[in-house]
Image (cartoon, rainbow, N blue to C red):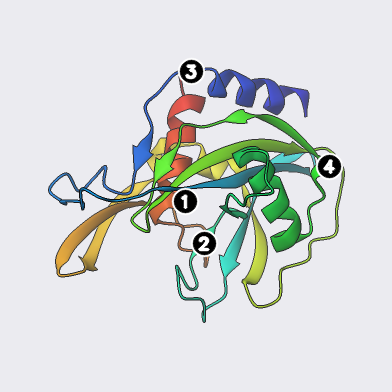
Amino acid sequence: MTDIKERLVRALSHPSDSSSDFDLNPGVVLPGNRTLRPAGVLVPVQIQSGKPYLILTKRASHLKHHPGQIAFPGGKQDEGDADVSAAALREAWEEIGLPSKNVDVLGQLPSHETVTSFIVTPVVGLITKPFEQRPEEGEVEEVFSVPLQHVIESTRFSIQSRRWRGSRRHYFTVPFGPYYIWGATARILRGLAERMEM
């Protein structure tokens, strides 16, 4: 656990710019009066059988925003949250049953702007104790793990595209088995991969 903790802390110490869902789509014109809402997501790393894994969720298919997509546990910052880290930890408890006392927060990745007008801060945390995964009924369809090594190798990422609101939108992907990891989740992981390779 010490080795991966040191590697993550070192990666988080590298300065870099924030990212955006529009990184690969420079021609997209955004409204000038756009208001970005703060949100926090947890990038939870857990040691399983001696190896580091990343915990992710599959969102319920009936949700209004991002139905069925692969996501980090997290959400918008509420008035009662001290900061985005607190929001990420609260949401991780609500969405997957991860107690905040079981998380060693190592730091933050640069913020990420989404097409849904959120400014998301990824909070990297190492899970220090086992916990019982409990998907939030109605919001989370599944909680699953991906080997961390799979998502910190930049060669595993590819750029794909689809039509969105009348134009072609490009985005990063890093599929794993039956899970199609793309969009903001893949872009944030791509940023982590770049830092881990420095």
Q: For the residues marked 2 and 1, what is the alpha-carbon distance in whole angstroms? A: 7 Å
Q: At which x and y percent is residue 24?
A: 23, 45
* Residue on which disc 4 sits: 102
Q: Residues within 10 Å of mark 2 (few under 14, many from 20)?
A: many
What residue do we see at 85% from left, 41% from top? 101
The disc, 2 or 1, on the residue closer to the chain's N-terminal end is 2
Tell which of 130 and 153 is nearer to you: 130
Q: At which x and y percent is residue 172?
A: 34, 50
* Residue on which disc 1 sits: 185
Question: Which amino acid lies under the numbered mark 3 shown in the image of this protein?
Answer: His
**Does 192 sit left or right of 135 as displayed?**
left
Instruction: Inspect this view and state whether residue 190 appears.
Output: yes
* Residue on which disc 2 sits: 70
Question: Which amino acid lies under the numbered mark 1 shown in the image of this protein?
Answer: Thr
Q: For the residues marked 4 and 1, what is the alpha-carbon distance in whole angstroms? A: 23 Å
Callouts 2 and 4 close, C-beta under 8 Å: no
Q: How crowded is mark 1: few (under 14 residues within 10 Å), some or many (20 or more)?
A: many
Tell which of 129 and 15 is nearer to you: 15
Q: For the residues marked 3 and 4, what is the alpha-carbon distance in whole angstroms? A: 26 Å
Question: Which amino acid lies under the numbered mark 4 shown in the image of this protein?
Answer: Asn
Whether residue 154 is situated above or below residue 8 in the rendered picture: below
